[in-house]
């Protein structure tokens, strides 16, 4: 009777300790059960849901969901199998969370547009300036040639006038020729004066263009300096801390904080989904799993595929 009672007490204590242990370590146990796919994520599907999309990003929840689907397809296409499946109550919660990183990115995008516009204005104005300078140089040479020719003709005319004055006057035929020569010289002088006025006006135009070019250049430098002053610091770097994969007990989540355009958004989502699959960072700068989001491709590299096949135990 005593042994029976002792056994019951012992059994009760074992059950109590076991129950208490399960309660204490429940998060770890649930994590192991819920994340068993990490050992081979290709043997099952991973359900995900969209938890939060901050409206300050300027995209709808459906647009964000579409980007997640595109990111998931990057991995699924490589092995010809659906790995990620959307569900309103999916275990993997994916969010788009706005903070100073995206604020800086949006400011940079706006400055990109302003800088590009200023560069176009500057380049167009510089082309006009160069054309005007070439025209000015050409007309300067033309004017100088005309002045030289005029001075030579005027000297010839004056020498003839002196000669005929010293010899009692020019005969009628020669006198008429000298009068015509005088009229031609006056017309040429008018042409020179007009060309000189054109050059002055053209020079003023060139100076105005130069002032505008300098203003645009200063403004462009100011914008570039402003650009370089935005996003300085670790949290605004190109590292994939633009997004993060979190696992806490039985819950999993992906939080995206920053992206420049849709391609970059899909890439950072694909990168974090890679971590969900259990993939680590790769050393290939072109890979989705490279720690810096510097690529532009939406397809996996051979290194990405090899890492995926290894974790999925595909030969």
Image (cartoon, rainbow, N blue to C red):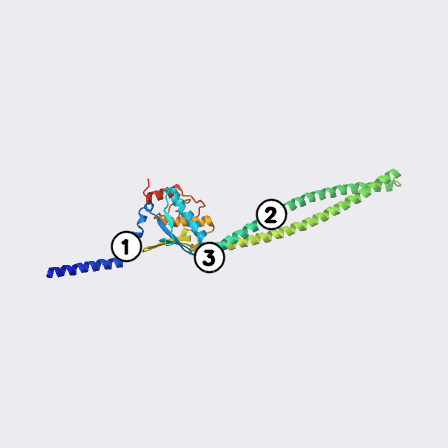
User: Can residue 292 be seen in the rendering of this structure?
Assistant: no
Q: For mark 1, does the 10 Å Cα neighbourhood hold few (<14), some (14 to 19), or many (20 or more) residues? A: some
Mark nearer the N terminus (2 vs 3): 3
Q: For mark 2, does the 10 Å Cα neighbourhood hold few (<14), some (14 to 19), or many (20 or more) residues? A: few
Which percent across, then down, holds residue 41? 33, 47
- In which quarter of the view is residue 22 placed? bottom left
**CA gap, disc 2 and disc 1:** 67 Å
The quarter in which the C terminus is drawn is: top left
- In which quarter of the view is residue 95 placed? bottom left
Circle 1 SS class:
helix
Residue linked to disc 2: 124
Q: Which mark is residue 29?
A: 1
**CA gap, disc 3 and disc 1:** 36 Å
Q: Which mark is residue 55?
A: 3
Q: Residue at x 62, y 51 (%)?
A: 210
Viewer-closest of 157 and 278: 278
Which percent across, then down, holds residue 264? 45, 49
Viewer-closest of 128 and 105: 105
Q: Residue at x 70, y 47 (%)?
A: 199
Q: Residue at x 67, y 49 (%)?
A: 203
Give the label, 2 or 3, closer to the camera. 3
């Amino acid at each position: 009777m005593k042994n029976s009672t002792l056994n019951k007490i012992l059994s009760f204590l074992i059950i109590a300790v076991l129950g208490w242990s399960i309660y204490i370590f429940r998060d770890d146990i649930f994590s192991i059960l819920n994340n068993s796919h990490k050992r081979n994520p290709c043997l099952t599907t991973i359900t995900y849901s969209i938890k939060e999309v901050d409206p300050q990003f300027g995209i709808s929840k459906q647009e964000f969901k579409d980007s997640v689907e595109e990111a998931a397809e990057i991995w699924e296409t490589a092995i010809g199998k659906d790995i990620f499946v959307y569900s309103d109550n999916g275990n993997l919660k994916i969010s788009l969370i706005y903070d100073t990183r995206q604020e800086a990115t949006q400011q940079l995008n706006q400055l990109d547009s302003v800088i590009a516009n200023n560069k176009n204005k500057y380049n167009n104005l510089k082309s006009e300036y160069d054309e005007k300078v070439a025209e000015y140089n050409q007309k300067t040479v033309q004017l100088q040639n005309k002045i030289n020719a005029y001075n030579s003709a005027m000297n010839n005319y004056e020498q003839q006038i002196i000669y005929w004055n010293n010899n009692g006057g020019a005969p009628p035929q020669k006198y008429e020729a000298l009068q015509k020569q005088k009229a031609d010289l006056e017309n040429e002088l008018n042409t020179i004066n007009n060309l000189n006025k054109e050059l002055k006006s053209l020079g003023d135009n060139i100076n105005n263009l130069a002032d505008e070019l300098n203003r645009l250049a200063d403004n462009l430098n100011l914008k570039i300096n402003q650009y370089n002053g935005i996003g300085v610091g670790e949290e605004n770097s190109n590292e994939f801390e633009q997004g993060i994969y979190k696992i806490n007990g039985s819950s999993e989540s992906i939080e995206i904080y920053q992206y420049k355009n849709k391609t970059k958004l899909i890439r950072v989502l694909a990168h974090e989904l890679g971590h969900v699959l259990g993939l680590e960072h790769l050393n290939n700068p072109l890979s989705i799993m490279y720690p810096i989001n510097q690529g532009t491709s939406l397809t996996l590299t051979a290194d990405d595929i090899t890492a995926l096949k290894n974790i999925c135990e595909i030969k």
